[in-house]
């Protein structure tokens, strides 16, 4: 902290620089591979610097990979709808429970909290969603199971509302004959922006990166695949890309689909939006990790 | 009593729209969380998709005896607990080390840059991490075989068929992706420490190392204890993505990569062996509940504010 040793400063900087390098390196390998032609990869393997920049993979994706672009669109759609639902529910429940004189408050809090301690596991959940609610092979299968609400977030939201919104403010609004719902929109939400930003961010990341719902619930309708499901299928099935693209127009690429680099190019486009906005939400991200880290 | 009821009735009326707004969330919890809990009893049934939850016949503990007669029961428990302990010990030591280093950095810009970069792996999906690992380990094109082993004149290694390498690979991958956020948690604790301890230490001529070992580490102790106990409470859970996606679900690696979560998935979706899958999942849920409850009551004794309840 207040160390005077100059040596330790240097030591810390060197170690952290090495660690950052190790963190970023695999991504460089990924991007470089996506910019290398298949022929070069076949000879030299995946390497950190493309010997010759080759954009065939990306041209292929944007010109002929209409299904892949559709999957990309699905990711945006699912993330948008899912995050909106998640935040609305989290806010409504957190706000309800923040009312100290609410009838049934203790029971409802426990009802939410208990889901953090005990869960039925993947298979009973799969049976409920696929057999009872029948979400399989619909977009609902990507949005509803597991991701739409987290008890932990509801509790964070409730705590935020109770500790950061001055009671006098709500009482004054009540005097002005504002309704309870009105207070939520006029006072509580505007005053909770940092918390809402953090929760929105984590919910959006969870949806963007999710591939498990697709794995369980998209059995036949592969056209509902998100980009993560496409990545997952390709990894499991090398033939996938050929099957996947034979249905779409191949144009001049017939027979020479650059499989090795296209796989990497799809992986790259799946992280570009996240990395592009990361610098802007970095502070909320750190804050979320700190809140979540202590309570796991 | 009557006035109290009337009072509660008035409150109910006052908050009626708030209940209504929150209703979808509660319905969701019933479907997504409570119904699967009830579904756990299916572990004692001979479940068939055609007959459904209610009409499948009971079969006692047959699913469990069947599960424990296979070699996988031992393997998946050993792997789940073993990897968890390994990740717990290495992860925490490394995270504390990095957090202390971060605390020593004086330049604000450098500090922020380090924080930003080490958190990047936490942003991406496990599928993507599988791709990153594949770029290194692919037999034909991987960086390690082509750019490291070949120039050294060594035979390429077929990483995806040799289980013996995977405990190291999985640990390395787990460290790579989690050290960032774990050290941020510790770092947040460290910057909250009272600066006057350090100022006094400097006046007394303490070296940096003395400050770390006599001030920072002792002050971190409660946080470490809490985080370790919380992690012990998740002893029977494993990250499905890490163990399924990173080894690319390769059959030859199952002995080193099968945890309860991957077993449950494979038994159900690949082998269509619902009984064993349900039995394994049942044990995971019940044991998970028991250890979380124990962990929490321990935390409540040491530091009530950090307890979950």
Image (cartoon, coloured by chain):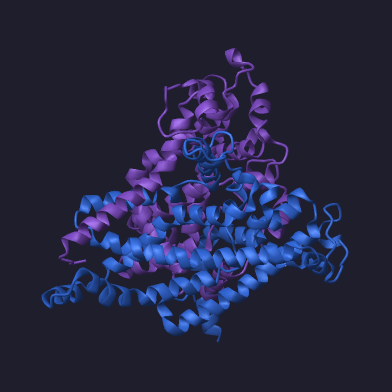
Q: For this view, does B242 lie left or right of residue B251?
A: left
Residue B133 x, y percent position in the rendering? 52, 44
Q: Is residue A122 above or below residue A232?
A: below
Of residues B175 and A79, the one drawn nearer to the viewer in this rendering: B175
Rendered hue of chain A is purple
Screen quadrant of the N terminus of chain A: bottom left
Q: Residue drawn 79% across and 57% down?
A: B274
User: How many numbered marks appear?
Assistant: 0
Q: Residue drawn 63% across and 41% down?
A: A139
Q: For this view, does B199 lie left or right of residue A223?
A: left
Residue A11 in view here: yes
Residue B141 x, y percent position in the rendering? 55, 33
Q: Residue drawn 75% across and 48% down?
A: B270
Residue A175 in view here: no
Q: Is residue A19 above or below residue A35?
A: below
Of residues A119 and A29, the one drawn nearer to the viewer in this rendering: A29
Q: Residue furthest top?
A: A252
Q: Residue drawn 40% across and 31% down?
A: A49
Of residues B291 and B17, the one drawn nearer to the viewer in this rendering: B291
Q: Residue furthest bottom?
A: B1
User: In the image, which lettered chain appears blue?
Assistant: B
Residue B114 x, y percent position in the rendering? 30, 51
Q: For this view, does A200 lie left or right of residue B5?
A: left
């Amino acid at each position: 902290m207040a160390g005077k040793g100059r040596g330790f400063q240097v030591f810390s900087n060197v170690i952290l620089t090495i660690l950052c390098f190790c963190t970023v390196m695999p991504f460089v390998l990924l991007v470089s591979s996506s910019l290398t032609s298949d022929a070069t990869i076949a000879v030299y393997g995946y390497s950190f610097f493309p010997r010759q920049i080759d954009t065939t993979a990306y041209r292929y994706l944007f010109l002929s990979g209409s299904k892949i672009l559709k999957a990309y669109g699905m990711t945006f759609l699912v993330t948008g709808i899912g995050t909106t639902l998640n935040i609305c529910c989290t806010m409504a429940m957190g706000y309800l429970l923040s009312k100290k004189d609410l009838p049934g408050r203790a029971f409802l809090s426990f009802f939410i909290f208990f889901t953090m301690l005990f869960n039925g596991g993947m298979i009973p959940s799969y049976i409920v969603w696929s057999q009872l609610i029948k979400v399989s092979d619909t977009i609902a299968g990507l949005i509803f199971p597991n991701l739409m609400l987290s008890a932990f977030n509801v509790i964070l939201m409730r705590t935020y509302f109770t500790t950061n919104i001055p009671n006098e403010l709500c009482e004054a609004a009540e005097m002005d004959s504002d309704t309870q719902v009105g207070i939520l929109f006029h006072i509580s939400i505007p005053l909770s922006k940092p918390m809402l930003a953090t929760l929105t961010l984590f919910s959006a990341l969870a949806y963007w990166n999710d591939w498990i719902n697709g794995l369980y619930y998209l059995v036949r309708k592969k056209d509902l695949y998100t980009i993560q499901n496409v990545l997952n299928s390709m990894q499991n099935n090398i033939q996938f890309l050929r099957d996947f693209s034979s249905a779409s127009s191949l144009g001049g690429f017939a027979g020479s689909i650059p499989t090795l680099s296209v796989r990497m190019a799809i992986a790259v486009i799946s992280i570009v939006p996240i990395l592009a906005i990361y610098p802007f939400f970095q502070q909320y991200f750190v804050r979320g990790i700190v809140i979540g880290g202590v309570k796991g | 009593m009557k006035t109290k009821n009337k009072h509660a009735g008035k409150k109910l009326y006052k908050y009626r729209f708030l209940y209504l707004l929150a209703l979808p969330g509660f319905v969701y919890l019933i479907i997504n969380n409570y119904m699967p809990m009830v579904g756990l009893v299916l572990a004692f049934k001979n479940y068939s998709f055609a007959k459904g939850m209610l009409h499948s016949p009971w079969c006692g503990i047959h699913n469990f005896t069947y599960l424990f007669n296979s070699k996988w029961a031992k393997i998946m428990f050993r792997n789940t607990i073993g990897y968890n302990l390994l990740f717990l010990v290495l992860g925490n030591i490394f995270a504390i080390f990095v957090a202390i280093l971060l605390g020593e950095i004086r330049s604000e810009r450098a500090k922020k840059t380090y924080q930003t970069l080490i958190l990047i792996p936490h942003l991406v999906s496990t599928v993507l991490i599988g791709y990153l690992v594949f770029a290194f380990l692919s037999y034909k094109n991987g960086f390690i075989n082509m750019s490291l082993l070949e120039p050294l004149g060594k035979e390429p290694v077929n990483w995806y068929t040799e289980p013996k390498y995977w405990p190291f690979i999985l640990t390395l991958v787990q460290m790579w992706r989690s050290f960032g956020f774990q050290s941020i948690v510790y770092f947040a604790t460290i910057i909250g420490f009272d600066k006057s301890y350090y100022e006094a230490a400097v006046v007394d001529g303490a070296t940096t190392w003395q400050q770390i070992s006599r001030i920072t580490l002792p002050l971190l102790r409660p946080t470490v204890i809490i985080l370790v106990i919380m992690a012990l409470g998740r002893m029977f859970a494993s990250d499905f993505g890490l163990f399924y996606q990173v080894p690319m679900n390769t059959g030859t690696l199952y002995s080193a990569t099968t945890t309860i979560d991957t077993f449950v998935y494979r038994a159900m979706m690949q082998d269509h062996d619902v009984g064993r899958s349900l039995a394994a999942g049942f044990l995971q849920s019940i044991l998970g509940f028991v250890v979380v409850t124990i962990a929490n009551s321990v935390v409540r004794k040491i530091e009530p504010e950090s307890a979950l309840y």
